[in-house]
Image: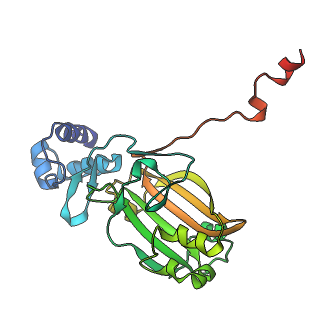
């Protein structure tokens, strides 16, 4: 009797051979169990194993689909902020990406770590702006961004809570308001994708998301925290490796000789 991992390997070979087209659901569990001559439970475990690996993704009652392949990485982030006619952007390879779906704005309580970064009390409301983007030909987003803005600033700048923030977005509104440049600091990490991220990014539970937390400041004042999430297998982070004073050449000992 075939174990579920052996059946998963056979399904993977069929996927790679193009037996089922990308963008359409693979056969249901009952058809798979007949195809591979295994118990229904074994076929189901094999499919769930491939979902966890990221080869497949589930859309509930619509079925299980083959995840489209993409070059890795699809886009790379570095240590620079860029600007074009649309405003500031942080990923050069995603410069022409567009919004997918309808952005949302709501006043709600942020995660505790975001509240700490904003310098507000736990449970205090902020303005939360959610946006999903992807390449011009994408059918689903590849990047999710959530912006958290302190309510006192939104009170001074109502555009920050509006559906239309005006030309070039919230960063231009903030710089215009303060008549001063923004500065940013980013922290990059990774974690398992939550249910909503799996659904929107079309990834399985076994794939982590790259999480970039960006803090925007005017002087010492934090005016926004942005949390961007993307499938970790489609993005990379690139930066120059600089020598610390302790690693400079010639070394102190060599200079004294």
Coordinates of residue 157 in the picture (x, y in percent): 57, 81
What residue is drawn where x is 33% and y is 48%? Answer: 54
Coordinates of residue 23 in the picture (x, y in percent): 18, 53
Residue 79 against residue 62 in the figure, above or below: above
What residue is drawn where x is 67% and y is 76%? Answer: 120
**In the displayed structure image, the side of residue 210 where residue 100 appears, left or right:** left
The answer to whether one can see residue 37 in this image is no
Query: Is 64 or 253 nearer to us in this picture?
Result: 253
Single out the residue that lies furthest toward the right: 256
What residue is drawn where x is 44% and y is 51%? Answer: 208
Coordinates of residue 230 in the picture (x, y in percent): 43, 54
Query: Is 105 or 116 nearer to us in this picture?
Result: 105
Query: Is 137 or 88 nearer to us in this picture?
Result: 88
Where is the C terminus found, in terms of image quarters? top right
Please, which colouring scheme is shown? rainbow
Query: Is 74 or 15 nearer to us in this picture?
Result: 74
What residue is drawn where x is 42% and y is 61%? Answer: 144
Where is the N terminus found, in terms of image quarters? top left
Residue 162 against residue 113 in the figure, above or below: below
The total number of labels drawn is 0
Coordinates of residue 20 in the picture (x, y in percent): 13, 46
The answer to whether one can see residue 147 in this image is yes
Residue 98 against residue 70 in the figure, above or below: below
**In the displayed structure image, the side of residue 201 where residue 12 appears, left or right:** left
């Amino acid at each position: 009797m075939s174990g579920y991992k052996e059946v998963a390997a056979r399904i993977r070979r069929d996927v790679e051979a193009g037996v089922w087209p990308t963008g359409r659901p693979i056969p249901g569990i009952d058809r798979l169990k007949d195809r591979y001559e295994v118990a229904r439970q074994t076929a189901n475990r094999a499919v769930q194993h491939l979902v966890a690996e990221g080869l497949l993704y589930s859309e509930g009652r619509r079925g299980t689909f083959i995840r489209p392949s993409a070059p890795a990485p699809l886009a790379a982030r570095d240590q620079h902020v860029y600007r074009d006619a649309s405003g500031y952007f942080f990923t050069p390879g995603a410069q022409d990406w567009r919004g997918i779906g309808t952005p949302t704005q709501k006043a709600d309580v942020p995660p505790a770590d975001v509240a700490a970064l904003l310098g507000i009390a736990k449970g205090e409301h902020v303005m939360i702006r959610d946006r999903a983007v992807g390449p011009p030909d994408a059918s689903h987003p590849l990047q999710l961004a959530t912006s958290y803005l302190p309510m006192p600033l939104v009170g001074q700048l109502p555009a920050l809570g509006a559906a239309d923030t005006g030309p070039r977005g919230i960063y231009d509104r903030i710089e215009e308001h303060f008549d001063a440049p923004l500065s940013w600091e980013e922290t990059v990490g990774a974690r398992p994708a939550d249910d909503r991220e799996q659904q929107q990014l079309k990834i399985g539970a076994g794939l982590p998301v790259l999480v970039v937390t960006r803090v925007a400041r005017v002087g010492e004042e934090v005016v926004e925290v942005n949390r961007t999430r993307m499938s970790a297998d489609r993005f990379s982070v690139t930066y120059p490796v600089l020598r610390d004073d302790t690693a400079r050449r010639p070394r102190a000992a060599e200079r004294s000789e």
